[in-house]
């Protein structure tokens, strides 16, 4: 399975458009070579360099297995109709959907985009946390791939 973005290269800087200093919209993501047997996909975006703990920026699941992309600017709706009913969780800003990088001043932070191929669809309510998602996917992950970006203010 492959995950990429036309907005930034793996390991490179995330453009400000996708951060709190820009439009704060989700970047476009391309998905290729999904693992056979995949029923749905789940995506988690987090910042492992946040002070004190990993900070969650986006949690979305029940993305269709045949999706070849996640478009730019996914709306902050609990249920994303444009992604065939994918469901979004609550990020650590306390909001539903994507919130972009917004680190304190200082060195660049890393932002991990982690895509999971699952052998099931998940019965999780909208607004669930990353911890609830992680518990629900346990034993159902048949593949995973990552993409990383960085950002500093």
Image (cartoon, rainbow, N blue to C red):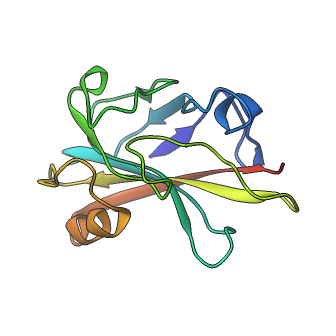
Q: On screen, 87 above or below 22? A: below
Q: Quadrant of residue 8?
A: top right
Q: Residue furthest front?
A: 94
Between 87 and 52, the one lying in front of the other is 52
> Seen in the image, is 83 located left or right of residue 17?
left
Q: On screen, 107 above or below 85? A: below
* Residue 126 coordinates in the image, percent (x, y): 22, 47
* Residue 57 coordinates in the image, percent (x, y): 52, 52
Q: Quadrant of residue 128?
A: bottom left
| Residue 36 visible, this orientation | no
* Residue 50 coordinates in the image, percent (x, y): 67, 68
Between 18 and 135, the one lying in front of the other is 18
> Seen in the image, is 15 located left or right of residue 65?
right
> Seen in the image, is 115 located left or right of residue 38?
right
Count of numbered circles on the image: 0
Residue drawn at (87%, 62%) of the image: 107
* Residue 74 coordinates in the image, percent (x, y): 43, 27
| Residue 33 visible, this orientation | yes
Q: Quadrant of residue 97?
A: top left
Residue drawn at (48%, 41%) of the image: 98
Q: Residue furthest bottom?
A: 52
Q: Residue furthest left?
A: 123
Q: Residue furthest right?
A: 106
Residue drawn at (18%, 45%) of the image: 39
């Amino acid at each position: 399975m492959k995950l990429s973005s036309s907005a930034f290269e793996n390991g490179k800087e995330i453009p400000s458009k996708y951060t709190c200093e820009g439009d704060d919209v989700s970047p476009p993501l391309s998905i290729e070579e999904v693992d056979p047997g995949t029923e749905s996909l789940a995506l988690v975006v987090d910042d492992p360099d946040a002070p004190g703990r990993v900070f969650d920026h986006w949690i979305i699941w029940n993305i269709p297995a045949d999706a070849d992309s996640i478009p730019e600017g996914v709306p902050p709706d609990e249920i994303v109709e444009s992604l065939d009913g994918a469901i979004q969780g609550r990020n650590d800003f306390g909001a539903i959907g994507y919130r972009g990088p917004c680190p304190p001043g200082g060195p660049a932070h890393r932002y991990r985009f982690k895509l999971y191929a699952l052998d099931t669809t998940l019965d999780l309510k909208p607004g669930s946390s990353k911890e609830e998602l992680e518990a629900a996917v346990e034993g159902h992950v048949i593949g995973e791939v990552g993409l990383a970006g960085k950002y500093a203010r």
